[in-house]
Amino acid sequence: VKKVYITTPIYYPNAAPHLGSAYTTIIADFLARLYRALGREAFFLTGTDEHGEKLERKAEELGKTSRELVDEMSRLYKDAWVRLGIRFDRFIRTTEKEHEETVRELLKKIHGKGDIYRGTYNGLYCVGCERYYTEAELVDGKCPYHDAPLEEKDIEAYFFKLAGYRDKLLNFYEKNPQFLPEGREKEIINRVGELEDLCISRPKEQLQWGIELPFDAGHVAYVWVDALLNYVSGAGYGTSKFREVWPPDIQLMAKDITWFHCVIWPALLMSAGLELPRRVVAHGFINVDGRKMSKSLGNMVDPLELADRYGPDLVRFLLVTKLPFREDSNLVREQIPEVHKELAGSVGNLANRVLKLLSGVDVGSFKPDTKLKGSCDGLLGKIRKKAGGFDVTGISALYSQEVPELAHTINSYINETEPWKLEGAAKRDAVLNAYEGLLFLMAFLSPVLVNGWEKFRGVVDAPGMGGLKGFGQNSPGLEPSSSKLIMYER
Ligand SMILES: [Zn+2]
């Protein structure tokens, strides 16, 4: 069986990781862990995009070599992800030899196919984005993402025959409607109608810090082409591993870079003769206190600062369960301590409450409560279905509503049955039903609350506690489907 292949964009390491990149990467990590919990093997790729003019200039400013700067910055990203409980399978750096070789090999293939030609380009270039803009894309004559004026440049360059892929792309979208990010289909399809060829190189006298073209050493690859191909090299192109992973199933990103991933990326893959990704998934931007985050507004939220203060589980819980996935979201800083209280109050207190009730009760067979059991099984079925369809928006909706609600359902069950007033078999049934519910809840939350789950596992896996696995094997109260929810055999 093919591994579920999940990617984030590779980040441009000219500044420390921010809330936006942390969000994408935490969602990717959450999904990889969720698939593993459901019994699928997953491969999660992230990394840093280390070539280009911006980094070269920044290194000069700091009096460092480009190499020194990217070594330092990529370490910063890796460390940040570890501090946020993120566990990637591969961290790719575009300055790695394997990546550079893959890029050259694929460009050679594309060139050999006759899809690359030499020409000149006069364009409006944004240094911030490292890309050219057409007049139509500008906002008030400026880059839509940066407040800086664009530079006009006339350069000799190589072009990819992107316009020639127009019909093939439209045909691909039609046959694979799940490929384009939800809500952005029309916008992309309309723009593909007016596709132009793409400049894919920069002359070396303009930029040293890049990958030399295999057919002309005087030019380096355009940074976006270099970056997009990380998904190929990161999957182990040219090795036996590649077949276990390729193609990507979920390619996560913020909504501003969908054009590259929905148009340029699949066209390059078609030209190189590689299978196309299953889904491009775009999330909205995170606003803070109702405004776009900015240093001058003083509303920056540093995910690492939050993790230091409340622990990484809170940051993950906040980002996975409290923000709408597809739309732009609003994070209200004042509410963060409340979310922290809520997490401790609902999940933490429930766990303590149930574990306390368990003392003096033998963990073994019991008569299941149909309603509570139905809620747990029903939710598991829904999560499986959404995950099976790679429906990230659907998974996200379940985790912002029904998963946290299960804590309340279990609490209500305990309040109604009042096990402390019961004795004998009735008490055992009530306590073990609540315990089973808690095991489900914690298993559902295990891809989010990574530290909490480890701690919880330490308790329930102790001798005499049954644990999720022991429970499934010994208890007639659990149906076979539930015992497949073994979330810790990773
Ligand atoms: Zn820009």
Image (cartoon, rainbow, N blue to C red):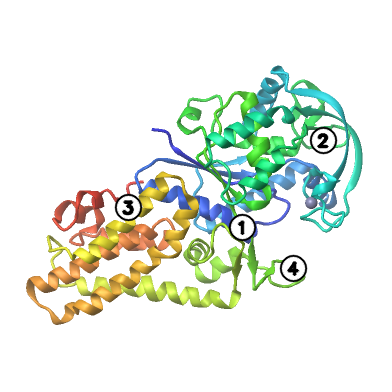
Q: Which residue is mark 2?
A: 208
- Comparing marks 2 and 3, which lies closer to the viewer? 3
In what element is the residue under mark 2?
loop
Q: Which residue is mark 1?
A: 284
- Comparing marks 4 and 1, which lies closer to the viewer? 1
Q: Look at the image and tell me in which quarter the N terminus lies.
A: top left
- Answer above or below: position of 357 versus 42: below
Residues packed near mark 2 inside 10 Å, few (<14), some (14 to 19) or many (20 plus): some
Q: Earlier in the sequence, mark 4 or mark 1?
A: 1
Could one spot residue 94 in this view of the protein? no
Q: Which residue is mark 3?
A: 381
| Residue 197 screen position, x and y as percent | 77, 31
Q: Amino acid at mark 4?
A: Lys
Query: Contact (CB < 8 A) between labels 2 and 4?
Result: no
Q: Which residue is mark 4?
A: 295
Q: Earlier in the sequence, mark 2 or mark 3?
A: 2
Residues packed near mark 3 inside 10 Å, few (<14), some (14 to 19) or many (20 plus): some
Residue at image location 46% in from the left, 54% down from the top: 394
Q: Amino acid at mark 3?
A: Gly
In what element is the residue under mark 4?
loop
- Comparing marks 2 and 4, which lies closer to the viewer? 4
Residue at image location 68% in from the left, 39% down from the top: 227
- Distance between mark 2 and mark 3 Cα atoms: 53 Å
- Comparing marks 1 and 2, which lies closer to the viewer? 1
Q: Earlier in the sequence, mark 3 or mark 4?
A: 4
- Comparing marks 3 and 4, which lies closer to the viewer? 3
- Distance between mark 3 and mark 4 Cα atoms: 44 Å
